[in-house]
Amino acid sequence: MTSVAVESSKTTVNALSVENVSHAYGARIALHKVSFAVAPASFSVLLGLNGAGKSTLFSVITHLYASRSGAVRIFGHDVARESGDALSLLGVVFQQRTLDLDLSSNKIWPITAPCMELGGAKRARDKSRNSPASAS
């Protein structure tokens, strides 16, 4: 009888992978070869002094800015080449809302969701248009 060992081809894909990412504002370098990975179902914190590049890094991760070099992947999807697939798997909550402070989340969602091509955006927009409050 012959015994055959079978190797598992199951590999873990990181939830977020940042590989040698660099970004600059003109001649001013904000990020230089930043690399790290976040495992699925884990909790991570990004800390740094003012001006350290945290906001720039999040802007690159969310594809608001293109990196000068390197790659960002969300569950294996490259943010630069597969931005729709990658960003549909990402949720970001920023510190400050950038819209009118008097707007509720139900009013903000129909405005922001279509910009990010998020699921349910059309339903939210249609619901907002058909609500009695939107008739005014």
Image (cartoon, rainbow, N blue to C red):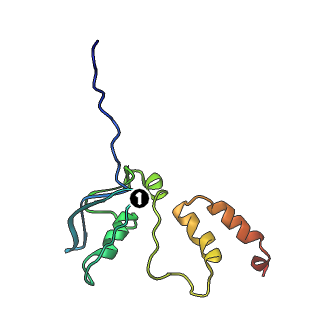
Q: Position of residue 94 (x, y in %)?
A: 44, 76
Q: In this view, does 109 lie to the left or right of 43?
A: right
Q: With respect to residue 95, does 113 lie above or below?
A: above
Q: In which quarter of the image is residue 47?
A: bottom left
Q: Position of residue 84 (x, y in %)?
A: 47, 54
The quarter of the image holding the N terminus is top left
Outermost residue, bottom side: 102
The quarter of the image holding the C terminus is bottom right
Q: In this view, does 1 lie to the left or right of 95?
A: left
Circle 1 residue = 41
Q: With respect to residue 102, does 79 lie above or below?
A: above
Outermost residue, front side: 1
Q: With respect to residue 86, does 48 lie above or below?
A: below
How many numbered badges does the structure rendering display? Answer: 1
Q: Position of residue 109 (x, y in %)?
A: 60, 71
Residue in view at x 72 percent, y 65 percent = 126
Residue in view at x 57 percent, y 85 percent = 100
Q: In this view, does 61 lie to the left or right of 134?
A: left
Q: In this view, does 118 lie to the left or right of 130?
A: left
For numbered disc 1, what is the local secondary structure?
loop
Q: Where is residue 123 in the image (x, y as percent from the top left)?
A: 68, 61
Mark 1: give few (<14), some (14-19) or many (20+) Cα within 10 Å. Answer: few
Residue in view at x 43 percent, y 54 percent = 86
Residue in view at x 67 percent, y 66 percent = 124
Closest to the observer, 118 or 81: 118
**Type of amino acid under label 1:** Ala
